[in-house]
Amino acid sequence: LHRPGIDEVTWKCKKCNSGIKKRIPDILDVWLDSGSVVWAAQEYYSGESENFDSWVSADFILEGKDQIRGWFNSLLCSAMVSSKRKNYNACYMHGWTLRDKVKMSKSKGTQIFPEDLIEGTLDDLQKKKSYSNIKGIETFRYYSIGVTQPGRDFNFNTKEYADTYKIINTIWNIYVYASEKLNLAQFDRSKIIFDEGNLGILDKWLISRLNSTIKRVTELSDNFKLPWITGELKEFIINDISRWYIMLNREKLDIYSDSPDKFTIMTVLFDILFKVILL
């Protein structure tokens, strides 16, 4: 019910039997509805006091910066006033996505749809020949994570997006190269008994770098510092694996190589790439 129809609805006061209840001009903040989600999410709430405070705090919430006075505020205020405790443990706030340093707008036709980037049909990509083959969900994900600073706007940049595609393409080429060499050598990880005593200094270095990267990425993830994760992964995959480990071991990985280190190198490369996927 809305104005003016709601003003025609009145109730007789049961306490005094003479007064009339009617709409008052004051409006309750509409965000109170969303701020009450902790009670709405309970399996059952009868309205009785014994289970009023039985809700559990959310581990994580995510929304745009416009929710500082909206959802973030109504959630916290509702919980503190009613239960004297917070109802979320971590809050991640993102900014606006800009195009040419101006907020994207459907009414102005300046918006970019994610599917246009994923499918490679965006005009900005198609009108430049070197960008026309850029597509894929992984490029979109990697770019989005890398450029989105917590709480800050980011300006979509076609060149930066194209550079991200090059990173993803390099990663793909690493896996194609490794798969080819391992398949030609009939490499079967389940039949390999890994002996750390056979590791060379380059093998030990790469394993050490992997462990350092895992530790660093875990720390960044736990602290919601997502944009820095892509930099760590790029440094390890592009530089450490591709430009150092594979390049320096290229001859030993060749199908005609009779190097005694060949299968040790393949085992290290297989294990490293598998763990990178898990990251």
Image: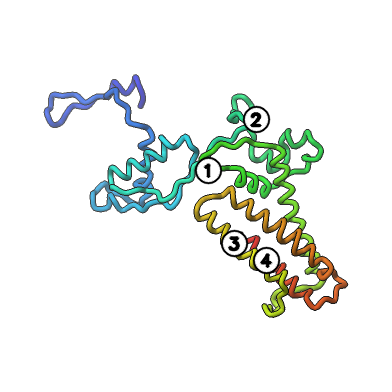
**Disc 4 residue type?**
Ile
- Left or right for 195, reference 22: right
In the structure shown, which secondary structural element does the residue marked by tag 2 occupy? loop
Q: Earlier in the sequence, mark 1 or mark 3?
A: 1
Q: Which mark is residue 214?
A: 3
- Left or right for 223, reference 122: left
Residue, disc 2: 100
Whole-angstrom CA distance, mark 1 to mark 3, is 22 Å
Could you tell me residue 111's position as x and y percent?
63, 31
Quadrant housing residue 159:
top right
In the structure shown, which secondary structural element does the residue marked by tag 4 occupy? helix
Whole-angstrom CA distance, mark 2 to mark 4, is 40 Å
Whole-angstrom CA distance, mark 1 to mark 4, is 30 Å
In the structure shown, which secondary structural element does the residue marked by tag 3 occupy? helix
Q: Earlier in the sequence, mark 4 or mark 3?
A: 3
Count residues near mark 1 (Cα–Cα under 10 Å), then give few for <14, some for 14-19, many for 20+: some
**Disc 2 residue type?**
Asp
The residue at the point 68 percent across, 71 percent down is: 204
Q: Which mark is residue 150?
A: 1
Count residues near mark 3 (Cα–Cα under 10 Å), then give few for <14, some for 14-19, many for 20+: some
Q: Earlier in the sequence, mark 2 or mark 4?
A: 2
Could you tell me residue 207's position as x and y percent?
66, 68
**Disc 3 residue type?**
Ile
**Disc 1 residue type?**
Pro
